[in-house]
Amino acid sequence: VTPDKVRGLLSRASWEVAPELIGWTLTHEAADGPVTVEITETEAYAGPLDPASHAYRGPTPRNRVMFGPAGYLYVYLSYGMHWCANITTGPDGEASAVLLRAGAVVAGASVAMERRGNVRETALARGPGNLGRALGLTGALSGSDVLRSPSLRLQPPGTAGQVQVASGPRIGITKATELPWRFWRQGDPTVSATRR
DNA sequence: CACTAGATGCTCT
DNA sequence: GAGCATCTAGTGA
C-alpha cells in the first residue's frame, strides 16, 4: 500500500476513519530506541460542528495542523504533563483528527518500559497520555508526516484480521458527549479496564 | 473493583 | 484567569 493510497483513506471523515485505525501500527524511532504500538482505541474529533474539538473555534498556533491534509501528527500537551497524539484526517482545509487513546506495544517493549516505569505490559500504552509517553512523543513532532517521515511510520495491518470494534461516547470531555465517537477493540486488555 | 482528589502548566479568552 | 481530548495514588468495599 503506497503512502498516497493511505493518505486517501485518511482523507475522509474522522468518525469513519477512527474505527478503521484499530489494528494499525504506529512506530516512532527515537534516540533511545524504536517502539511500535498497535492501535486498540481511538476517538474521532471534527471541526466547527464539534464543540469538543480543539478545532471548534478555528485555527490557532497549536491546532493548525488539524486544518491541513490528512496523515500528519497532531500532538498537544494535556494537563501540563501528557503528550497526546492524533492522526489528522479529512480533506485539506477541513479540520479533523483521530485521537490515539490506547495501544498494544508490539515492538520495543523494553524501551517503552524505560519510559513508563515499572507497569504491566498491557498498561504501557493505555490511555492517550501513556501512549504518547510509551512512544516517546513530544510537541516537537506535531506536524510530522506519519506516512513519509523517517522517524514516524503509520502502517495498515498486514492481513486484515477481522476484529470486533465497539463504539461508545467519548471520554474526558464535557461537550457533545452524546456522539458515539470512541472506538475500541472489543475485549482488548490494553483498553481501560472498565471500558472494554 | 469503583470512585475521588490533587498535581500541573499550557492555551486561549 | 478559566478550563482543560489526563494520570496516579489513595480510600472503601
Image (spheres, coloured by chain):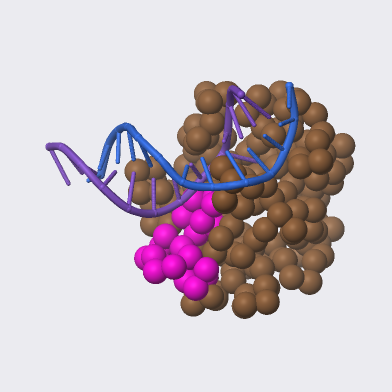
Chain colours: A brown, B blue, C purple
The residue drawn where x is 57% and y is 24% is A175
The residue drawn where x is 81% and y is 36% is A60
Looking at the image, residue A153 sits to the left or right of residue A22; the answer is right
Nearest the viewer among A80 and A73 is: A80
In the rendered image, residue A122 lying in the magenta stretch gets the answer yes
The residue drawn where x is 38% and y is 57% is A189
Looking at the image, residue A168 sits to the left or right of residue A193; the answer is right
The answer to whether residue A156 is seen in the rendering is no
Relative to A108, residue A130 above or below: above
Q: Quadrant of residue C13?
A: top left
Q: Position of residue A23 (x, y in %)?
A: 56, 58
Q: Position of residue B5 (x, y in %)?
A: 35, 35
Please provide the residue range marked out in magenta.
Answer: A112-131
The answer to whether residue A69 is seen in the rendering is yes
Q: Quadrant of residue A93?
A: top right
Q: Position of residue A196 (x, y in %)?
A: 39, 46
**Which secondary structure is most common in the magenta stretch?**
helix
Relative to A122, residue A186 above or below: above
